[in-house]
Image (cartoon, grey):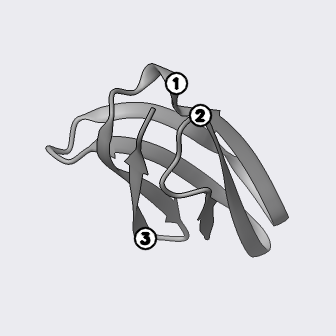
Amino acid sequence: FSVYPNPASDIISITLNLKETTSVTVEISDVTGRLVAVIMNENQSGVVTKQFNTASLPNGNYLIWLKAKGQTLSQKLTVTH
């Protein structure tokens, strides 16, 4: 999955490329592990793009978690306003 732009100041786009229909969860947490937002929690397939407005997040570093098919991936996100 990809996150653009990073660092972000307002809207980010998260793009997933799923080969088959599966339950997908995308979440943002702060660096202490506290859940900040759930961006997606649904069945999806194919190329999927979701947008999220980071304006409500303070400046700092976050983790974006992708959970699908029993696997978990993460990417660092930096928010600067």
Which one is in front, 15 or 41? 15
The image position of residue 37, as x and y in percent, is 45, 31
What is the three-letter code of the residue carrying label 3? Leu
Q: Gap in Å between the C-alphas at discs 1 and 2?
A: 5 Å
Residue 49 falls in image quadrant: bottom right
* Quarter of the image that includes the C terminus: top left
Q: Which mark is residue 73?
A: 3
What is the three-letter code of the residue carrying label 1? Ala
The image position of residue 36, as x and y in percent, is 36, 31
Residue occupying the point 46% across, 44% down: 27
**Please, is residue 1 above or below residue 30 in the view?**
below
* Quarter of the image that includes the N terminus: bottom right
Callout 3: 10 Å neighbours few (<14), some, many (20+)?
few
Callout 2: 10 Å neighbours few (<14), some, many (20+)?
some
Q: Gap in Å between the C-alphas at discs 1 and 3?
A: 24 Å
Which one is in front, 50 or 57? 57
- Residue that carries the numbered disc 1 in the rendered image: 55
Residue occupying the point 64% across, 55% down: 23
Secondary structure under tag 2 reads loop
What is the three-letter code of the residue carrying label 2? Asp
Residue occupying the point 43% across, 54% down: 64
- Seen as rendered, the residue at the extreme top is 56
In the displayed structure image, the side of residue 69 where residue 78 appears, left or right: left
First of labels 1, 3 by sequence position: 1
| Mark 2 or 3, closer to the camera | 2
The image position of residue 78, as x and y in percent, is 39, 51
- Residue that carries the numbered disc 2 in the rendered image: 10
Q: Gap in Å between the C-alphas at discs 2 and 3?
A: 23 Å
